[in-house]
Amino acid sequence: MMQTQSTVRVAVVQASSVLFDLKASTEKAVSIIKKAGDKGANIVVFPEAFIPAYPRGMSFGTSIGSRSPEGRKDWLKYLENSVPVPSETTKVLGAAARKAGVYLIISVIERDNDWSKGTVYCSVLFFGPDGSLLGKHQKLKPTAAERIVWGEGDGSTLPIFTTPFGKIGALICWENYMPLARAAMYAKGVQIFITPTADSRDLWQSTIRHIAAEGRCFVLSSNQYVTKDMYPTDLACYHELESSPEVMCRGGSAIVGPLGEYIVEPVYDKEDILFATLDLREISTSQFDLDVVGHYSRPDVFQLIVNEEKKENVKWVTY
């Protein structure tokens, strides 16, 4: 049985991608991982879609009933800069985690590696301090226009990883508004709940504080800080950004304790790394009056069924 440490030092990254650039975004991630490791981090968390981009403000030339040739060109650029899992990129990220001696949780745009290779998913990859790729989570429900470019994950990628620093799991952005998805995480005993996001609204802060208080867990919420001048001007649909504000995403990364109080308050309008040393015993003390899968549950009244089988693709049969 793995021995759990009583404390853990975490690093929550607030930084932008090098948008639409797989190689440069990966290099930036490696540099940040080293900085976090040098400052004693045991766990390093990156924002939603860090490699290669969260394509905020773009429609890829779509409207209901039509797609433009220019939008298809931008889609191809996005696809070609996405991350097959496993791949050379995951090897580089694993090596960075090993050199820094950290658990690395990083969200990427994952290119389908099993079937058509023409679908991408918003995913979270988990790496161990030995550099191994422990597993992944694919976003179950892309939000609104995200559905134009991202596929839907399935229940086979809802992992919880047992580490010396407690049980770690992740849901991405508005997946955390799916009550049953949260319940599945709680039922698996999540203690360090990772919530990579692209939501910089004040309301998101209420969400992560609620999750921490509801699940009696630590919440590490990581967002990007992005300005319009970071977008490559050679995008075929670059004109779509003309009406966008100069600050496309102001950030709001934060660290919350299991009673819903900030350990590190949200940071806005800059790139930064948020550090904190967490006392894991606070989880137990917080559960004194609320344990939603223990003494505060009613399994005789409510039951949750989670289908964790891998979604199989269409099997073509010829005669």
Image (tube, rainbow, N blue to C red):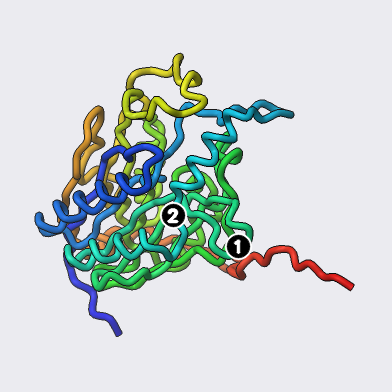
The residue labelled by disc 2 is 83
Residue type highlighted by circle 2: Val
Left/right of residue 141 with respect to residue 28 in the rendered view: right
In the image, 268 versus 76, the foreground residue is 76
Label 2, secondary structure: give it: strand
Pointer 1: what residue? 302
User: Few, some or many C-alpha atoms within 10 Å of disc 2 (few <14, some 14-19, many ≥20)?
Assistant: many
Q: Position of residue 135 (x, y in %)?
A: 42, 67
User: Which residue ends up furthest to the right in the rendered image?
Assistant: 319
Q: Quadrant of residue 150?
A: top right
Q: Quadrant of residue 299?
A: bottom right
Comparing 198 with 203, the one in front is 198
Q: In this rendering, does residue 294 appear at all?
A: no
Please identify the quadrant where the N terminus is shown.
Answer: bottom left
**What SS does tag 1 mark?**
loop
Q: Is residue 112 left or right of residue 229?
A: right
Could you give the CA–CA distance between mark 2 and mark 1, rounded to whole angstroms?
Answer: 39 Å
